């Protein structure tokens, strides 16, 4: 099942890139493996997946310890400050920085461990009450404030778009995130590069790619429905 799903997702990514006149190499697929057993992740690994996404620190760390070391782990879920110490040095990219306090904690830990940490700023682009993420209008200020923190490198923006039946409804939000990144990039803030856009999930990753996604985060489309709510 996983091989067939991966083939299907990869074909869709290719088609979306073609629609948008983009190179396939510009888009990286993150296999979102939360709640799934290592055996399933290993199956995806055997079919070529090297980028995995988890939304809980403990689960990321457990899988990190067991699985091959050439995997890049993406922390895509809400991150509490008291858990930062467990992911710094393990996650290749933290997608969910949405406050200066969190950025400061990551920086402190990065300095302590003498590592560089790449992060994205999570933006609540549709302004949903239920979502984490900084409001679009406050994103630039957060980028400016976090930009000078040692050990921390801001690479771009991430968003979790609304849950919709028709992915076209989210096109506006993906376009808005892209524009926000372009606007911030134009300010030429030191130590800030807004080239990475993490957007698009199983329901809408093709639209996200057409609007400029560099990472798409696909869980259900690869591993099937999750058995318990997360
Ligand atoms: C679970 C999750 C995904 C993947 O969702 P699917 O709809 O299963 O593809 C993507 N991004 C984040 C932040 C998630 O928590």
Image: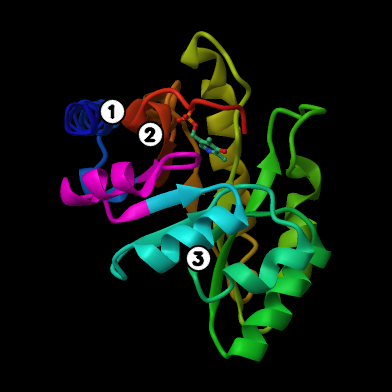
Residues at discs 2 and 3 in contact (Cβ within 8 Å): no
Label 1 residue SS: helix
Image: magenta residue range: 30-51
Residues at discs 2 and 1 in contact (Cβ within 8 Å): yes
State which mark lies toward you, 2 or 3.
Answer: 3
Q: Residues within 10 Å of mark 1 (few under 14, many from 20)?
A: many
State which mark lies toward you, 1 or 3.
Answer: 3
The answer for how far apart the CA atoms under marks 2 and 3 are is: 23 Å
Residue tagged 3? 91
* Residue 78, numbered circle: none
As drawn, 37 above or below 210? below
Earlier in the chain: of badge 2 and badge 3, it is 3
**In this orientation, which residue lies closer to the viewer: 53 or 161?**
53
Q: Say if disc 3 is inside 8 Å of ligand 1.
A: no
Q: Position of residue 222 (x, y in %)?
A: 32, 31
Q: Position of residue 143 (x, y in %)?
A: 71, 62
**In this orientation, which residue lies closer to the viewer: 78 or 86?**
86
Quarter occupied by residue 64:
bottom left
Left or right of 9 in this view: 223? right
* Residue 209, numbered circle: 2
**In this orientation, which residue lies closer to the viewer: 170 or 47?**
47
Earlier in the chain: of badge 1 and badge 3, it is 1
Say whether residue 97 is visible. yes
Q: Quadrant of the N terminus?
A: top left
Residue tagged 1? 16
Label 3 residue SS: strand
Q: Residues within 10 Å of mark 2 (few under 14, many from 20)?
A: many
């Amino acid at each position: 099942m996983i091989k067939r799903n991966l083939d299907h997702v990869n074909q869709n990514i290719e088609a979306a890139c073609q629609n948008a006149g983009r190179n396939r190499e510009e888009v990286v697929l993150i296999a979102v493996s939360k709640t799934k057993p290592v055996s399933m992740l290993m199956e995806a690994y055997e079919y070529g997946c090297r980028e995995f996404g988890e939304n809980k620190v403990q689960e990321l760390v457990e899988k990190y310890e067991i699985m091959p070391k050439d995997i890049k782990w993406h922390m895509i879920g809400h991150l509490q400050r008291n858990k930062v110490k467990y992911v710094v040095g393990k996650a290749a990219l933290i997608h969910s920085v949405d406050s200066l306090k969190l950025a400061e904690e990551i920086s402190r830990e990065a300095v302590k461990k003498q590592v560089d940490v790449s992060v994205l700023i999570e933006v609540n682009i549709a302004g949903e009450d239920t979502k984490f993420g900084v409001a679009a209008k406050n994103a630039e200020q957060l980028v400016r404030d976090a930009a000078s923190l040692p050990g921390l490198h801001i690479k771009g923006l991430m968003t979790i778009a609304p849950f919709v039946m028709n992915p076209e409804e989210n096109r506006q939000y993906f376009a808005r995130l892209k524009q926000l990144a372009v606007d911030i990039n134009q300010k030429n803030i030191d130590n800030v590069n807004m080239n990475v856009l993490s957007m698009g999930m199983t329901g809408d990753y093709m639209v996200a790619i057409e609007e400029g996604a560099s990472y798409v985060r696909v869980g259900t489309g690869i591993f099937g429905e999750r058995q318990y709510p997360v």
